[in-house]
């Protein structure tokens, strides 16, 4: 295997950053331009990669689109304002790139099509009745592969047996609560135990993780937007304390996480973009498209992070994992 992730992640973030700065009209010739309001709860590599993948799919479908991008800067109240403004502006579609963004969009409109991703459990979040029963104006792609948590717990149990796994999350994010409950269920019957800390804002993360480090042998980060937006401070504590940092998304390896048994968020965004293209081309209505799931998960390991966190390299990882390598050579 041993695929290199550095260039993929960098390209995804670069495309997203360019769109966020420009947000220009992508029209060519006399084709009609559709206006897509794109909103996400905060800017961090995973969500940025999903947005870049979404834009790529729209472009590949030959759709001329103007993207109006807005970040809520970590504040759900801002998500509501952004969604309301999109409705007032009369956008043709809303791309909701996180659970809070999708909830706000659905609360703001029952008419404008909404396509979401970076949502762990759209049923629990109240976005759809069931994965195969999308709403009248909403559907999308969830970000949790059914086997991701079990595979990650198995990896930790095999390589760091008898460890206490430290979990930090925002209890106000339904995505996170679903994942934490699943992790606690998955560790039953293994040699592992868990310890938890909760946070309300990204400013709380550093102190919470520092306290968590007193009890934890391994950190396992779920796809919590509040926590991931403060990832650099977590990496710093992991490196200083020699605590392996396991993430749920390969994009976090670019900031210094050691390993991730997760999904490629650029691919998730692309899947969502394909759904959006089908709707924009009048091929399907949102209510006709079941919620999608990631097609596969990949174990990705950052060898530099392993060294920084004092992890003894296991030669078996050479064949079992894909390798993240920084482009800063």
Image: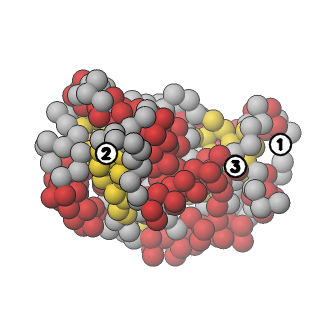
Q: Residue at x 30, y 30 (%)?
A: 281
Quickly name the residue at label 3. 7
Q: Position of residue 64 (x, y in %)?
A: 38, 42
Mark 2 vs mark 3: give the one in front: 2
Image position of 309 (left or right of 229):
right
Kind of element beneath mark 1 = loop
| Earlier sequence position, callout 1 versus callout 2 | 2
Quickly name the residue at label 2. 33
The answer to which of 211 and 222 lies nearer the viewer is: 222
Q: Position of residue 258 (x, y in %)?
A: 69, 53
Q: Residue at x 68, y 60 (%)?
A: 256
| Earlier sequence position, callout 1 versus callout 3 | 3
Q: Position of residue 78 (x, y in %)?
A: 27, 67
Image position of 308 (left or right of 220):
right
Image position of 51 (left or right of 309):
left
Assess whether mark 3 and mark 2 are in contact (beta carbons under 8 angstroms).
no
The answer to which of 94 and 243 lies nearer the viewer is: 94
Q: Which mark is residue 314?
A: 1
| Earlier sequence position, callout 2 versus callout 3 | 3
User: Few, some or many C-alpha atoms within 10 Å of disc 1 (few <14, some 14-19, many ≥20)?
Assistant: few
CA–CA distance in space, label 1 to label 2: 52 Å
Image position of 313 (left or right of 134):
right
Q: Position of residue 63 (x, y in %)?
A: 38, 37
Kind of element beneath mark 2 = loop
Q: Residue at x 80, y 32 (%)?
A: 319
User: Few, some or many C-alpha atoms within 10 Å of disc 3 (few <14, some 14-19, many ≥20)?
Assistant: few
The answer to which of 312 and 271 lies nearer the viewer is: 271
Q: Quadrant of residue 140?
A: top left
Assess whether mark 3 and mark 1 are in contact (beta carbons under 8 angstroms).
no
CA–CA distance in space, label 1 to label 3: 24 Å
């Amino acid at each position: 295997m041993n695929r290199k992730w550095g260039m993929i992640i960098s390209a995804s973030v670069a495309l997203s950053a360019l769109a966020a700065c420009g947000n220009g009209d992508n029209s060519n010739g006399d084709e009609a331009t559709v206006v897509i309001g794109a909103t996400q709860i905060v800017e961090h590599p995973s969500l940025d990669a999903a947005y870049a993948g979404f834009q790529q799919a729209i472009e590949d479908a030959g759709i001329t689109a103007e993207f109006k991008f807005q970040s809520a800067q970590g504040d759900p109240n801002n998500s509501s304002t952004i969604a309301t403004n999109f409705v007032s502006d009369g956008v043709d579609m809303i791309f909701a790139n996180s659970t809070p963004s999708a909830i706000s969009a659905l609360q703001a409109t029952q008419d404008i099509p909404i396509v979401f991703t970076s949502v762990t459990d759209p049923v629990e979040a109240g976005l759809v009745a069931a994965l195969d029963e999308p709403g009248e104006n909403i559907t999308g792609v969830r970000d949790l592969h059914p086997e991701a948590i079990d595979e990650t717990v198995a990896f930790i149990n095999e390589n760091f047996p008898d460890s206490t796994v430290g979990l930090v999350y925002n209890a106000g994010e339904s995505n996170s609560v679903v994942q934490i409950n699943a992790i606690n269920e998955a560790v039953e019957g293994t040699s592992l135990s868990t310890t938890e800390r909760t946070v309300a804002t990204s400013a709380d993360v550093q102190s919470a993780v520092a306290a968590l480090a007193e009890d934890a042998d391994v950190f396992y980060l779920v796809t919590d937007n509040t926590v991931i937006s403060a990832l650099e401070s977590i990496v710093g504590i992991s490196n200083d304390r020699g605590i392996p940092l396991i993430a749920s998304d390969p994009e976090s390896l670019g900031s210094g996480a050691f390993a991730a048994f997760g999904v490629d968020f650029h691919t998730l965004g692309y899947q969502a973009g394909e759904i959006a293209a089908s709707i924009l081309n009048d091929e399907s209505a949102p209510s006709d498209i079941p919620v999608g799931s990631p097609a596969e998960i990949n174990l990705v390991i950052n060898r530099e992070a392993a060294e920084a966190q004092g992890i003894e390299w296991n030669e078996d990882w050479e064949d079992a994992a894909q390798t993240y390598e920084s482009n800063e050579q």
